[in-house]
Every structure is written in C-alpha cells, then in structure tokens.
Image (spheres, rainbow, N blue to C red):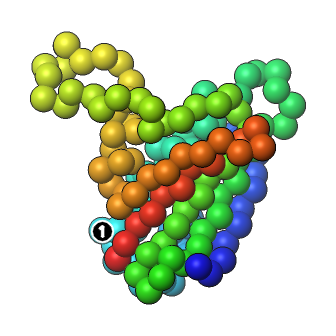
Amino acid sequence: MGFLLEITLPAKLGNLQAFIEPVKGCAKEQGFGEKRLAEIELALEEVLVNIFNYAYEESSGQPYAKVVCQRDGDSGFLIEIEDAGFPFDVLSEGQPDVTADISDRRIGGLGVFLVRELMDDVQYRREDNKNILTLRVEK
C-alpha cells in the first residue's frame, strides 16, 4: 500500500468540496476514468454528508472528518474516512427493499446501499473511539 493523501477538516457541509476535489484528483492521478471518478465522488459525498449531519451533537467540541487515500496494489485505491462522532456501523444497516413501492419503503438507508453498490468493498471498524470507514475501488 502507498500513502497518497490526507485531509483533516472541520465536519461542516461547507468543507465538502475541500474533501472531494483532492480525492478525485488523487484518484485521477492513479488512472481512474471519468465514470469511476464520478462514482468515487458520489460515494464520498454520501458518507461525508452523513458525518456532517449526524455524527456529532451540536455541543460536541470540534467535530472533524479525516480522509486518507492510499494505493492498494496495481489497480486498487483505498479511501479511509474517519470521524470521532457517535459509534455507527453503516454496514449493520439492513439492505433496503428497492423493489418495494416508494410509499412502502422506510426512510433512510438508500445512501449506504448506494455506497455499497458503487464501491468494490466497504469495511467499518471502531477504533480509539473513532468510526473508520474504508472504501475500496478498483479501476
């Protein structure tokens, strides 16, 4: 594995592009095409917006998000997203029934489903009171 990029910023919606653009640039340098870059952007946006909106209480000090990018073999790319918010294993959420009528579906869960569909692998761990989500994407 090869370290490529690390970004740590306050967990605020106004910082969304400050996370996404460098990650996309890094992935592009690794040879990812436009379709995969768009998928990386969409998955990363979904994860970060959830962190910004739900991971921290209003009164919790300095909420942050950290994104680290690494090479993984010849064609793999890892994006690790960390926050110190509420423990939340996104992978513990059940799969939504995307075949059900829209009026019969429960609210929420589609973003996690989308991330799982777009990325080649998604792993979660809780370490040192931090949520760490690893997205793996292949060319």
- How many callouts does the rendering have? 1
In the displayed structure image, the side of residue 96 where residue 116 appears, left or right:
right
Q: Mark 1 points at which residue?
A: 35
Say if 72 sits above or below 109 in the image: below
Q: Nearer the viewer, residue 113 or 42?
A: 113
Q: Where is residue 52 in the image (x, y as percent from the top left)?
A: 63, 36
Q: In which quarter of the image is the C terminus?
A: bottom left
Is residue 61 at all visible to an observer of this figure?
Answer: yes
Task: Tell me the quarter of the picture where residue 119 sits.
Answer: bottom left
Q: Quadrant of the N terminus?
A: bottom right
Say if 60 sits above or below 90 in the image: above
> Residue at point 30% right, 32% down?
95
Give the residue type that dot 1 points to: Lys
> Residue at point 54% right, 46% down?
124
In the displayed structure image, the side of residue 114 where residue 30 appears, left or right:
right
Q: Position of residue 121 (x, y in %)?
A: 40, 57
